[in-house]
Image (spheres, coloured by chain):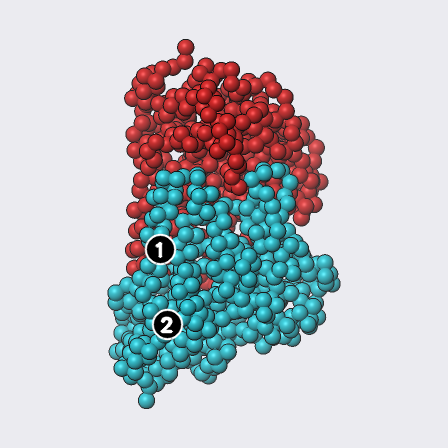
Chain colours: A red, B cyan
């Protein structure tokens, strides 16, 4: 028999991370399982940003570039992200968007490959990688004379043999929640004479990452998902110190200059990761992100990413168990791997029919997950890796479990709502069938 | 005899734009002449951003991408900037930083030039252009096999003859406040078979700009100066409709995709200016910028940019007149052109000695301008264009006059403080001699 509501409540009571939930605003009547898309609001953010607006901007004006430390926010926030991804202080900056940062690091990786392995002319990635990563790579490959080779997960290792110059992967897949094993894949890339670029959009703050231990080459990541930095919060970029000073990234703006206030006409890149900055950054959005990052400081005292990972796996295990028992017979398949080592912090369910309407019916009940259409990349290869047994690529119901603020009782209620939506046929109401322009 | 304080007060009383000042927070005891670097706080911004944080993010969470219109903020704000720069609705998007946007449009310009004029291999700019523009151009030129030719203002037209592919200029010079005449320079570029790229960082919201009438090719500009969008507010980008769909800019992220939510692996650029978007944008900073742009809506009813220009010139004329009469004999030179057609919305004074300390002494008195060191580009060619008669390139005291919120009485008091600082020798106090890391 599946765990009872009382059992789930007991799990919350004994959860050593339970106090972290109090750092966030959680709307009444909402079970928020979409923190993998936009994290919730840290309680400190409204007052912090208000202070930046009214005092730092409104009263101190231009002086705040010095007095409030605006100019060094990219480095200050980078140092707060560094321990979450296995980077050292001074190795990370927060700036621009994930897509722009990927352009910078992939440019650098290709420039290094052109020197170290000039015969290699292929960039390898996954067909089901987040599309913006593929778009950025597609453009750079065309410009630099490289081929972008897209493979299924089991095709990655074979693709490294031959003329692969760069392996570009997203650590946790946005659609399936499947997690790559960073260290051995990076080692395999290196053994094949290939650089490894990692996108940590669905990893940073969600699963343990150790970039330096894995000897990864480049990484980028997102501020507004598991880091709870607010809508469109700036992204981050990390470069292995062995590469950091070797190449000047193409977006050579003044914030990455060695002496930006000398206003000299020739570009001299700053040392280290600072050269990955470009233009002036949005201070209000950076201030909100800092509030999200500070919660990880509080989490550190309670066991940090290791403890968060333990809870994340307990939450997703519980969700899978409850769905499989309480929602059996309703055509749901499990897309996310059962194997802990291969699972991120989300669970994706597949259904051949009605996935969109089911998600809408859940949202109407206050259970916020999201919908992703059947894999648009090929119609093959992105089939559920476990569980469903179906062929082809059904639509997906996606549920993120942020261990900072999701509790075990939340999981129980979410599944109870899902059960009711399915059993009553509520999802078949006309109101849930119309797709919005943006989902 | 120079205008009296009472005369200046009478000018304020009869100023048809006087009411616009009430849209802004102006700190007590401060005369803010640095709006050309960071504009002041619109009164609506604190409440607007608080609502975005507490309601749109905190309560509505991911749903706000649709319900609050987050996804279309780049276009919505672009449409509010369009009338300020002579662009049509749908021709401008707000996104990323000025430097990143310059990279996009200069890439596009070079791609077009490569097709239309493959023999032309030079990008022409001004030696005293804002350095980040030169850094971006330097990198792109190296990558694409172009030469970046930097000339003095009187060398621009001669440089267009020959193999110039792109003319890249900042409309109003950040150091001197000198304004180029956009239409004839663009026409000269076109006559020479050359594209014209304009940086409007010190123009948008400060001086009338008519990109379409000038038939300019590409333009970028800044959100946090005269548009009062807040520290590091996102920038804007405009592309002439004749070029907009011709080229796919290199930062091909998902926000510029024709169907970003189809999540297909191949990049298909959106139509029009939307393809100049890349990644997810910082919503809090965009919300603040919208407050700054709304003031221009109120200004439109009072005569818009034409009325703002009239007042701007009256303010800078008054400042020049008062400085020349009341501060005579203190070694100040006038760097900014006297000719209205060549003047932006700032006035720069030169002094061979003590400029930094004088600016610091003024700031201590609440008169906030800023300091720029003697032209670092060459030591020649950026000498004062009028007035000082000195050779070489002295340091600069820079004062911006934003007609939305600066009054004529402010100008009178600013000059009175300058006079006192100079006459008393106050600027020679040791406290004003130490340079900060960031000015």
Q: Residue furthest top?
A: A1
The percent coordinates of residue B187 (x first, y second) are 64, 72
Give the farthest residue toward the right: B119
Point out residue A32 in the picture as x, y percentages from the top left corner: 40, 32
Q: Is residue B343 above or below residue A177?
A: below
Subunit of label 2: B
Residue A157 lies left or right of residue B48; in this view the side is right
Residue A321, picture quadrant: top left
Which quadrant is the C terminus of chain B positioned in? bottom left
- Write down the residue under mark 2: B17
Q: Which chain hosts label 1?
A: B
Q: Position of residue A335 (x, y in %)?
A: 54, 23
Between residue B42 and residue B401, name the one nearer to us: B42
**Crowding near the residue tagged with mark 1, few <14, some 14–19, many ≥20 C-alpha atoms within 10 Å:** many
Residues at marks 2 and 1, CA–CA distance in whole angstroms: 21 Å
Residue A40 sits above or below residue B238 on the image: above
Q: Residue at x 43, y 74 (%)?
A: B307
Horizontal placement of A133 versus A221: left or right? right
- Asked if badges 2 and 1 are on one and the same chain, I answer yes
For the residue pair B367 and A416, the one nearer the viewer reads as A416
Count how many numbered circles sit on residues in the image: 2
Q: Nearer the viewer, mark 2 or mark 1?
A: 2
The first of marks 2 and 1 along the sequence is 2
The answer to whether any part of residue A247 appears in the image is no
Looking at the rendered structure, the secondary structure element under dot 2 is loop
Residue topped by disc 1 = B45
**Residue B290 figure quarter:** bottom left
Judge whether B432 appears above or below A345 on screen: below
């Amino acid at each position: 028999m599946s765990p009872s509501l009382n059992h789930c409540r007991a799990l919350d009571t004994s959860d050593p991370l339970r106090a972290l939930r109090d750092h966030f605003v959680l709307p009444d009547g909402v079970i928020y399982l979409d923190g993998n898309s936009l994290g919730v609001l840290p309680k400190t953010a409204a007052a912090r940003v208000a202070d930046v607006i009214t005092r730092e901007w409104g009263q101190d004006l231009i002086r705040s570039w010095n007095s409030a430390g605006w100019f060094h926010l990219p480095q200050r926030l980078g140092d707060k992200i560094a321990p979450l991804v296995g980077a050292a202080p001074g190795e990370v900056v927060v700036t621009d968007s994930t897509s722009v940062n990927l352009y910078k690091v992939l440019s650098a990786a290709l420039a290094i490959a052109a020197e170290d392995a000039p015969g290699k002319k292929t960039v390898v990635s996954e067909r089901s990688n987040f599309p913006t990563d593929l778009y950025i790579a597609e453009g750079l490959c065309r410009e630099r004379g490289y081929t972008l080779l897209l493979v299924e997960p089991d095709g990655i290792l074979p693709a490294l043999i031959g003329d692969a110059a760069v392996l570009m992967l997203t650590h946790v897949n946005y659609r399936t929640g499947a997690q790559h094993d960073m260290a051995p894949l990076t080692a395999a890339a290196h053994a094949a004479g290939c650089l490894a670029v990692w996108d940590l959009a669905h990893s940073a703050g969600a699963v343990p990452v150790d970039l330096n231990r894995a000897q990864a080459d480049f990484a980028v990541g997102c501020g507004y998902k598991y880091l709870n930095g607010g809508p469109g919060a700036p992204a981050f970029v990390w470069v292995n110190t062995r590469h950091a000073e070797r190449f000047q990234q193409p977006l050579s703006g003044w914030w990455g200059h060695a002496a930006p206030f000398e206003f000299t006409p020739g570009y001299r890149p700053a040392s280290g990761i600072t050269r990955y900055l470009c233009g002036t950054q949005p201070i209000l959005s950076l201030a909100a992100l800092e509030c999200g990052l500070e919660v990880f400081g509080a989490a550190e005292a309670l066991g940090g990413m290791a403890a968060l990972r333990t809870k994340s796996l307990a939450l997703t295990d519980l969700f899978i168990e409850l769905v499989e028992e309480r929602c059996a017979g309703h055509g749901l398949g499990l897309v996310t791997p059962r194997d802990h080592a291969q699972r991120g912090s989300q669970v994706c369910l597949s259904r051949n029919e009605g996935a969109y309407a089911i998600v809408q019916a859940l949202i109407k009940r206050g259970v916020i997950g999201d919908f992703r259409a059947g894999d648009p990349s090929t119609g093959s290869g992105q089939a559920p890796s476990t569980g469903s047994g179906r062929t082809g690529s059904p639509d997906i119901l996606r549920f993120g479990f942020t261990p900072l603020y999701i509790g075990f009782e939340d999981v129980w209620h979410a599944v109870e709502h899902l059960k009711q939506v399915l059993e009553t046929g509520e999802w078949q109401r006309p109101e849930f069938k119309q797709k919005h322009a943006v989902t």
